[in-house]
Image (cartoon, rainbow, N blue to C red):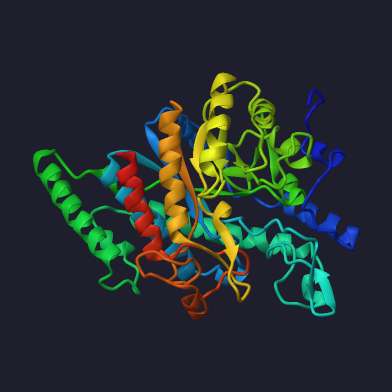
Amino acid sequence: MAHQWTPDSWQNCVARQQPTYPDRVALAEALKRLASLPTLTTAWEVERLRSELVLASEGKTFVLQGGDCSESFEDCNSTAVLRKLKVLIQMSLVLIAGARQRVLRIGRIAGQYAKPRSADLERRGDVEFPSYRGDIINRPGFSLEERTPDPQLMLRAFERSAMTLNFIRALSEGGFADLHHPENWDLEFVRNTPGSRRYQELLDSLSDSIRFMEVVSPGELHQLRRVDFFTSHEALLLHYEQALTKSERQRGWYNLGTHMVWIGDRTREASGAHVEYCRGIRNPVGVKVGNSMTPEELVELTRILNPENEPGRLTLIHRFGAEKIREKLPMLVDAVRSAGCRVLWSCDPMHGNTHSTRSGLKTRSFDDIISEIISAFRIHKEQGSRLGGIHLELTGEDVTECTGGPGNLTESDLSRDYRSTVDPRLNYEQSMEVAFLLAEQMR
């Protein structure tokens, strides 16, 4: 990695999980148009997130990162976005009140339109087409036209990311998250569930505290009227990421299509294109750490992606599964600590616990998710480390995609409202149960 970095230097490396566009002229035209559009974020916002992540690495803030496995164009509407925001705000409030700690909210939103796949082709019977790789690349329908990668979809994804981010900013700045009016966050389909009752009791207690503080203080607590909310997505489709990379005077290069990016477990080769691209941008970067990662590889990656060893720059997101975390995580934590690498550790309890039902549906067991979270806290404590964040695939919708949880969903329940086109997500009740568990573990 001694060579000079440029936004397109990744093209000299092996780039995995990239689509093959049949029309290269159309691809070039789409990228040129994309690069000319106003940016979605600013360098100042990115730097503010880095500052918040420094606090998280010091144990002063906990990172709640969550959202869809893969966003869809169809779900770019005010109701769906509002529900995602509501569940993340409710979860963060549980953590703040229950663990007495600040929470940094980062959504898997406004750009999470691409997904890696285990195979380039999908076969159904005697017919074979390119795999669906997310709405930014192709379409989920099973026909040659729908599965052929279309560069125009990058522009459609950018437009929807802009609309989503604009809506989130308007809500977060406009009083939607005002703690004086928590009724704004209610989800209309939640009715008298155990999780909702626990949450309401917490709200009542918090409201009493706010009223007391305003009685004894000179005025209203204005800092309770808004929240900061940052966006993130997997930096998977590298042509798209390159087109959104801009130079900001002497500060360096920024991906101004989001605030934070991460590198997936399938694309985190030290000599690969994704690591090459991410090493040169100023955005905070996450790396998914799976079962195939060795201590030596992880230390090498941290040094490539954070050569100055700056706090707030690199987040290691481990994803092993409930059965393997005890075997894998301790040696990686020990290697990173011994090398003196300054990182933030986060737990992704979703991806290592994915399995398929007899009918072929992907699902995750809520018990396995909870088990991995509890193990993660214990292992970090035993190793003299700190778990500083959680990374979840969740939705504000009342879906049935993961088994177990407060509703005791079984495999037979999944078909009732299974909507994900890629991986299963926690629903509202399951997400809130995770939040209460996290608060207990953080205490």
**Which residue shows up at 79% across the image and 65% down it?**
150
Quadrant in the picture for the C terminus: top left
Q: Residue 67 location in percent, x, y?
A: 51, 57
Q: Residue 357 location in percent, x, y?
A: 58, 70
Q: For this rendering, which residue is in front, 115 or 385?
A: 385
Position of residue 277 in the picture relative to residue 417 (left or right): right
Q: For this rendering, which residue is in front, 431 or 210?
A: 431
Position of residue 249 in the picture relative to residue 313 (left or right): right
Tell me if residue 226 can be seen: no
**Which residue shows up at 72% across the image and 76% down it?**
141
Residue 81 vertical position relative to residue 189 in the rendered view, above or below: above
Residue 143 vertical position relative to residue 406 in the rendered view, above or below: below
Which image quarter: residue 249?
A: top right
Q: Residue 123 location in percent, x, y?
A: 79, 73
Q: Residue 41 location in percent, x, y?
A: 57, 46
Tell me if residue 364 can be seen: yes
**Which residue shows up at 40% across the image and 62% down it?**
430
Quadrant in the picture for the N terminus: top right
Residue 328 vertical position relative to residue 81 in the rendered view, above or below: above
**Which residue shows up at 13% across the image and 51% down it?**
208
